[in-house]
Amino acid sequence: MQVYALGINHHTAPLDIREQVAFDPARLGQALHDLLRGRPVREAAILSTCNRTELYCATDEPMAATDWLAEYHDLTTNRIEPYLYQHPQKDAVRHMFRVASGLDSMVLGEPQILGQMKQAARVAEEAGTLGTLLSKLFQRTFSVAKEVRSTTAIGANIVSMAAAAVHLSERIFERLSDQRVLFIGAGEMIELCAAHFAGGKPKRLTIANRTPERAIPIAERFNGDVLRLDEVSERLADYDIVVSCTASTLPIIGLGMVERALKARRHRPMVMVDLAVPRDIEIEISQLDDVFLYTLDDLGQIVESGQESRQAAIIDAEKIITHRVDDFLHWLESRETVPTIRALRDAGERMRRHELEHALKLLHRGDNPEQVLEVLSKGLTNKLLHPPTQALNLAEGPERIEVAQLIDRIFHLHPDK
């Protein structure tokens, strides 16, 4: 059974492909059960973020997971294959270590991906699809990510998606302090964005969410207010900047809604930032003259220029990852000998019990204890040495030399060598 990682990300696939294979967070557990049902996949976890969808599996038939990914999203395998990467065993371990450490992110060194991987592991554990192999791999992954972030400069001067959103807004509006900002959603990304925008002290900061109770803590933290999601349509015109990141499978802001808002605003410009996959804001809105709509890919281009300061840290991070990959592979290899070790110990235990029972009978009969111990030790020694002695006697030709050398090595018969 091997570890495989497969999926697509912002390096291999455009946004319109990525959003077709994104998973609904509320249905991840169900999806994992579906993946393991009737397929040669023993363990699995799914990581689904704005920039990537990845499956981590313990299987000897990775194509089964690939076919399932396409089937689950009602796509043909040919549709996603050009964008798909598959990493077996060693490459899979390296890939997971690199992803968790922020080396494969759109924003080099960003810390959010580590939390997303931890959530993926939690969901898989709750779904019962995280076995010994993947559980150990995730533990090592988190440990490696912590080591990389604490011993290298990979996390220094982070330029996050949230910071990029602020930067784009400042291109259109001279001062954030004169603008009203609406955030749609109440997840981690929205909280990060709200923190960055709050630094510019906007005139108004509002959090809109389907469940207002979830938005209240974020709003209170940044001295903002709260809207119900169904109120956004009639209140959209009040805001100059809109940042949206929800788990909705359908667009939340449509073309007609924005056209009405622009009319009410007398065509004063609006900045809209869509951080969701699938997209929250209809792409046709980008064609409106007074709207500046930015997607994840747009932000990726903006933040790319801020990554040079972290390039030197990559070398140090890659060295750490290389060593830790070797360590994990050694652990994997050691697991292959576990059945043999267990069988050997079981055989030794049976011999011990047999000789002990025989010795106890002799003692109960009244035999001399010293003689009983002598019989016990000789009997146990003969039983333990019988298998290697027999293997040596039965071997012929070159095989006898190999068996002799192996016995010499196992029992340290000639330590001076």
Image (cartoon, helix red, strand yellow):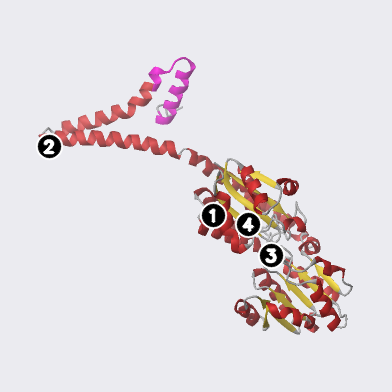
Residue, disc 2: 364
Q: Of callouts 4 and 2, which one flags the residue occurring earlier in the amino acid sequence?
A: 4
Where disc 2 sits, the SS reads helix
Amino acid carrying mark 1 in the image: Gln
Mark 2 / mark 3, whichever is N-terminal: 3
Between the residue at mark 1 and the residue at mark 2, the CA separation in whole angstroms equals 53 Å
For badge 4, the amino acid type reads Leu
Residue extending farthest to the top is: 397
What residue is pinned by disc 4?
Answer: 47
Left or right: 88, with 340 as reference point:
right
Magenta highlight on residue 321: no
Q: Magenta part mainly helix, strand or loop? A: helix
Q: Compared with residue 396, is residue 195 higher up or lower down, i.e. above or below?
A: below
Q: CA distance from mark 1 to mark 4?
A: 15 Å
Mark in front: 2 vs 3: 3
Q: x and y percent of residue 73 in the render? A: 67, 54
Q: Quadrant of residue 89?
A: top right
Question: What's under tag 3, amino acid-wise?
Answer: Thr
Q: Position of residue 328 (x, y in %)?
A: 55, 46
Identify the residue position indicated by label 1 in the image.
139
Circle 3 residue: 249
